[in-house]
Image (cartoon, helix red, strand yellow):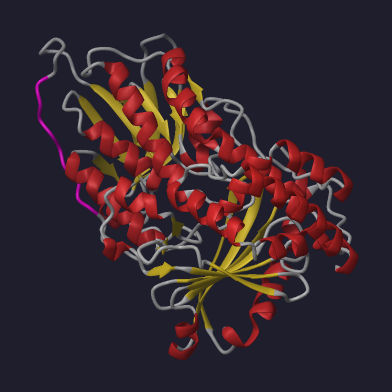
Amino acid sequence: MDHPHPGVESQPLIFTTKMKSVVAALALSTASALIPTRRPVKATTRQFASPRDVMEAKYKVAVIGGGPSGSCAAEIFAQEPNIDTYMFERKMDNCKPCGGAIPLCMVDEFQLPINLIDRKVRKMKMISPSGREIDIGQTMKAEEYIGMCRREVLDGYLRDRAVEYGAVPINGLVQEVTLPTSSDGKYTIKYANYAGDQKVGTPETLEVDVVIGADGANSRVAKAIDAGEYNFAIAFQERIKISEQQMEFYEELAEMYVGDDVSPDFYGWVFPKYDHVGVGTGTVINRPGIKDYQKAIRERAGPKIEGGKIIKVEAHPIPEHMRPRRVVGRAALVGDAAGYVTKCSGEGIYFAAKSGRMAAEAIVKLMQGGSRLPTEAEIKDTYIRDYDRAYGPTYTVLDILQKVFYSSNGAREAFVELCESEYVQQVTFDSYLYKKVQGNNPLKDLQLLGETVSSLIRGNAMAKPDAPINNPVESQKRI
């Protein structure tokens, strides 16, 4: 699915047909991804009796990937005593590039300790292409916030918790997944084992009955099961250490910049971390130009980050839509491997963790205490069906929003102007913080439609034209 840029004339019609959803979607305009270090965990083993034949081995599940999606899946599988759970992660202290924003509901839903949160963001500053600034967040309650975390800290905690429940961690790089040749056959995982911090991995294999592909955008599991390709954005981020005085400005504040100078189809950001800020941007339609866009976001932030020291540079792919196939046989994809990143906001942490948990819960229930194997149809009728019912509307709405508001500088000016509306801010933060589509005031929705049309007209009248892009080959590649 590419990112088309329809003319402004057609956009209000799209907006009309999806008005309630679009109002809700202004909710999720915040982005995801980031990182620092955690000690490798030691493998733990469990000894339980199998409900099947005592002489018969328990079924084995391999979770490939130890990020939020993999850890949350492994945690559920590990609590079933009649399933052996193995969790593969190449680097147990890995710092994954990420904005690091998580919604408030995730803290309670996944029982996250508050010390995982580096910053509690209660205000967002939106900056338009012309430099107009709108502060949003006045509708948030005192106890509400967007959590900013480092991925190495969050991921390490979730992995440790899965291990405490009984998952066996394997510090290994999965190189190949061989599919079974019969309905009840085994998957063979070929991997390089880096246990003991060895620089060269030892080739090993593991046979399992169920595979969870939680191994990110370049998923080997997805390739093994022929899940199909998807389009992707490149996100680029620099961690910048700024002065204490400069950090005070970002105490509870995150910034979002829009304009074709920082991205032709996404946005640039400054997100506060523990003792530094993450400054980045992303694009689908002009990936080779990412460094120019990064330079522009630094220039737009200006004195607020001036003199800062770049302590880490990160880049990674972000899926732009779901894989054509997310379940094949007894292998299921979750998180980025499945394509669960939202358009417009680029959010992925919550949906990764949620999809991992939902997939594992569905499969554990289907396995009936480790007494049977699930079928492809059963996994689709539970995990995939339930996930799509719960979050499909969110993905659709944010796709529409991206097409409407990120298509030109005029539309971006309109987007920032609309964010000044208290009603927009309320449904935006309510939808983002609690992951439920908001917007149930028909009169205000209708009023917002009129304001949207007016803002688009004004924005296109005042905004400078977007710079032309001529990069058809690179931006059409898929993974």
In the image, taking residue 77 as reference, residue 468 lies left or right, namely right
Snapshot quadrant of residue 103: bottom left
In the image, taking residue 44 as reference, residue 178 lies left or right, namely right
How many numbered tags mark residues here? Answer: 0
Q: Is residue 47 magenta?
A: yes
- Reply above or below: 335 against 80: below
In the image, taking residue 228 as reference, residue 215 lies left or right, namely left
193 or 335, which lies in front? 335
Q: Main secondary structure of the magenta part?
A: loop
439 or 405, which lies in front? 439
In the image, taking residue 164 as reference, residue 476 lies left or right, namely right
At 39% from the left and 37% from the top, the residue drawn is 356
At 13% from the left and 18% from the top, the residue drawn is 50
Q: Position of residue 14 (x, y in %)?
A: 77, 39
In the rendered image, which quarter contains the C terminus?
A: top right
Q: Position of residue 295 (x, y in %)?
A: 69, 74
Snapshot quadrant of residue 413: bottom right
- Reply above or below: 289 against 159: below
In the rendered image, which quarter contains the N terminus?
A: top right
Q: What's drawn in magenta, residue-wise?
A: 41-49
Q: Position of residue 36 (x, y in %)?
A: 37, 67
Q: Is residue 406 visible?
A: no
